C-alpha cells in the first residue's frame, strides 16, 4: 500500500513580519525586476559565441521530423547516385585513355611510316621520269636532229 505524505514549501513555513492590522511591512526587493537591464537596452546587442554551424543546426527543430527524414533520404540518394556516377565515369575514362595509349599510338606511328613510304615511292617515280626525259633527248640527237641550246 502507498502512503502519501504532504511536504510543505519553506516559503510557506517562514511567515513574513506583519503589523497589528496584518499588513505586510517588509518590502522585498527580490520581487521586483530591474527595468534597466542589459537585455532591454536598444543601443547594444548581447554578444553570442555562436557560429554559423550552431545557428544552422538550431534550425533543424523548425522542420518537422517526417520532412527531415524525407530530405535526408533524398539527399542520401542524390549523394549515392553522384558518387556512383563519378566512380564509373572515372573508370571509363581510365579504360579509354589506356586504350588510346596501347592501340592509338602504334597505329599513328604505322600510319606515319606508311605515308613516308608513299612519299619515297613518289620521289623515286619522279626521279625515274626525270632520268627518262634526259635519256630521250640524247637518242634524238643521235638521230641527226640537233636542237640549239638556249
Image (cartoon, grey):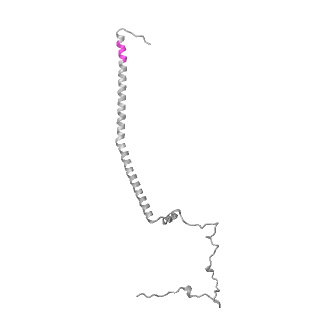
**134 in magenta:** yes
x then y, percent, for residue 56: 51, 63
Q: Quadrant of the N terminus?
A: bottom left
- Residue 106 quadrant: top left
Q: Which region is colored magenta?
A: 133-139
x then y, percent, for residue 128: 35, 22
Q: Quadrant of the C terminus?
A: top left
**107 in magenta:** no
Determine the residue positioned at 36% across, 37% down: 109
Per the picture, the main secondary structure of the magenta-coloured stretch is helix
Q: Is residue 80 shown above or below 28?
A: above
Give the camera-side residue of 127 and 81.
81
x then y, percent, for residue 51: 53, 63
Determine the residue positioned at 43% across, 64% down: 66
- Residue at the extreme front: 21
Give the camera-side residue of 58 and 22.
22
Determine the residue positioned at 37% across, 23% down: 126
- Residue at the extreme top: 144
Q: Is residue 105 shown above or below 7?
A: above
- Residue 40 quadrant: bottom right
x then y, percent, for residue 70: 42, 61
Give the camera-side residue of 64 and 99.
64
Taking 140 as reference, is 17 left or right? right
Determine the residue positioned at 37% across, 48% down: 92
Count of numbered tags = 0
Q: Is residue 86 shown above or below 40?
A: above
Amino acid at each position: 500500500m502507498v502512503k502519501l505524505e504532504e511536504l510543505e514549501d519553506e516559503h510557506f513555513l517562514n511567515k513574513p513580519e506583519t503589523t497589528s492590522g496584518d499588513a505586510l511591512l517588509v518590502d522585498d526587493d527580490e520581487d521586483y525586476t530591474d527595468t534597466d537591464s542589459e537585455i532591454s537596452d536598444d543601443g547594444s546587442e548581447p554578444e553570442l559565441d555562436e557560429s554559423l554551424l550552431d545557428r544552422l543546426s538550431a534550425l533543424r527543430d523548425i522542420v518537422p521530423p517526417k520532412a527531415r527524414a524525407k530530405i535526408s533520404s533524398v539527399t542520401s540518394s542524390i549523394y549515392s547516385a553522384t558518387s556512383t556516377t563519378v566512380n564509373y565515369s572515372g573508370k571509363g575514362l581510365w579504360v579509354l585513355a589506356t586504350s588510346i595509349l596501347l592501340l592509338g599510338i602504334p597505329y599513328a606511328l604505322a600510319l606515319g611510316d606508311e605515308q613516308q613510304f608513299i612519299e619515297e615511292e613518289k620521289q623515286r617515280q619522279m626521279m625515274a621520269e626525270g632520268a627518262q626525259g634526259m635519256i630521250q633527248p640524247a637518242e634524238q640527237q643521235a638521230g641527226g636532229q640537233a636542237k640549239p641550246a638556249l
